[in-house]
Image (tube, helix red, strand yellow):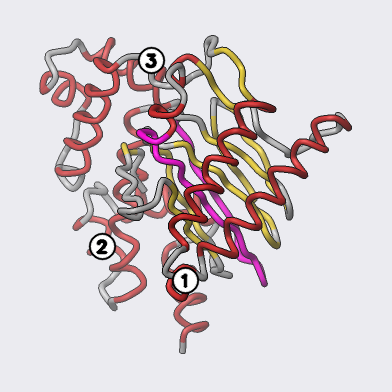
Amino acid sequence: MDYKYELVKADDDLPIKVILHTSDEEIYIPRHWHEDIEISYVLAGKIDQIYTDGKEYESSEGDIVVINSNSIHSFSVTTGKNRKAVTIFIRYEFLKAIYENSDQIVFTCNSTHEKDSSRIKKFKKIRTLLNEILVHYFNKEHDPLAHINLTGLAYQLIYQLLNDFKEEKKNSPTIKTNKYLERLTSITNYIKKHYNQNLAIDHLAAQFNLSSEYFSRFFFKHIGMTVLNYIHTIRLEKSYPDLMNTDLPVIHIALKHGFPSEKSYTRVFKSVYYMTPSQYRKMNKGKND
């Protein structure tokens, strides 16, 4: 489960992309970042934890949470029936082209625990617009003119966000400069490539010509997690297919994916899934049989 820069591939002829999430299984989308604006919209059920801008939220049916450009964020949901949510990406290039000062603003659009009546009305407008976008987006294969309609709706969505939820950028914990952004991307790419090797802090810091102390502080400041915990999440993500799709012993899976022992693997696994790898494998394989 790696914290990474995510390249969002939008539909070629559209300024937005929509992803529908309907799984009843436990899902963990680890911390990552990208330039595009991301909107999380829950249609049914809930998202147990959304991490963004250094804070955590629980998002329930009807809730809308906007993730700003280059904000580090993650999502976590436990098992649950009839859960449905969508993620809508607004292309950064599209926003920049129609609003020149987009780099100077953030959208404070988060409906979780909203009590202000005037803002609740504004969220209702956004919700109505998102519902219309979803109808046309998922029918676009049957409508040769859908891209025109959806482009118009994308303009309306940005207008509504700018009109009702725009604020001047202050000290939000986004990745501040291109220099830091490029360095973080290089570091996370290196760790992802070498995740199953012995990744000592001294070794990692030396790869980027940094002292161990500065490297650790820099990483924690921007990612919000220690380097070691970050490495653990990547190893856990990489091990998951072997755990669920093979009969390899747990000790073999642990060593194959960089954990020094089965005990270490079990400890990290339990911190995310609240049970041992063997228990999780047995429970979820039984569901699929």
Please tell me which residue lies in front, 39 or 26: 39
**Above or below, 48 relative to 240:** above
Can you identify the residue that label 1 sits on? Answer: 143
Q: Nearer the viewer, mark 1 or mark 3?
A: 1
- Residue shown at the point (46%, 76%) measured from the top left: 142
Can you identify the residue that label 2 sits on? Answer: 253
Please tell me which residue lies in front, 91 or 58: 91
Q: Earlier in the sequence, mark 1 or mark 3?
A: 1
**Amino acid on which the number 3 mark rests in the picture:** Lys
Can you identify the residue that label 3 sits on? Answer: 176
Q: Which residues are magenta?
A: 72-94
- Residue shown at the point (67%, 71%) measured from the top left: 82
Crowd tier of the residue under label 3, counting other residues whose Cα lies within 10 Å: few below 14, some 14–19, many 20 or above: few
> In the image, 85: left or right of 271?
right
Counting from the top left corner in percent of width and height, residue 74 is at 49, 41
Q: Nearer the viewer, mark 3 or mark 2?
A: 3
> In the image, 93: left or right of 75?
left
Counting from the top left corner in percent of width and height, residue 214 is at 28, 10
Q: Earlier in the sequence, mark 3 or mark 2?
A: 3
Task: Quadrant for residue 285, please give it.
Answer: bottom left
**Amino acid on which the number 2 mark rests in the picture:** Ile
**Amino acid on which the number 1 mark rests in the picture:** Asp
Asked if the magenta segment contains residue 73, the reply would be: yes
Crowd tier of the residue under label 2, counting other residues whose Cα lies within 10 Å: few below 14, some 14–19, many 20 or above: many
Q: Earlier in the sequence, mark 2 or mark 1?
A: 1
Counting from the top left corner in percent of width and height, residue 194 is at 15, 42
**For the residue labelled by badge 1, is the local secondary structure a helix, a strand or a loop?**
loop
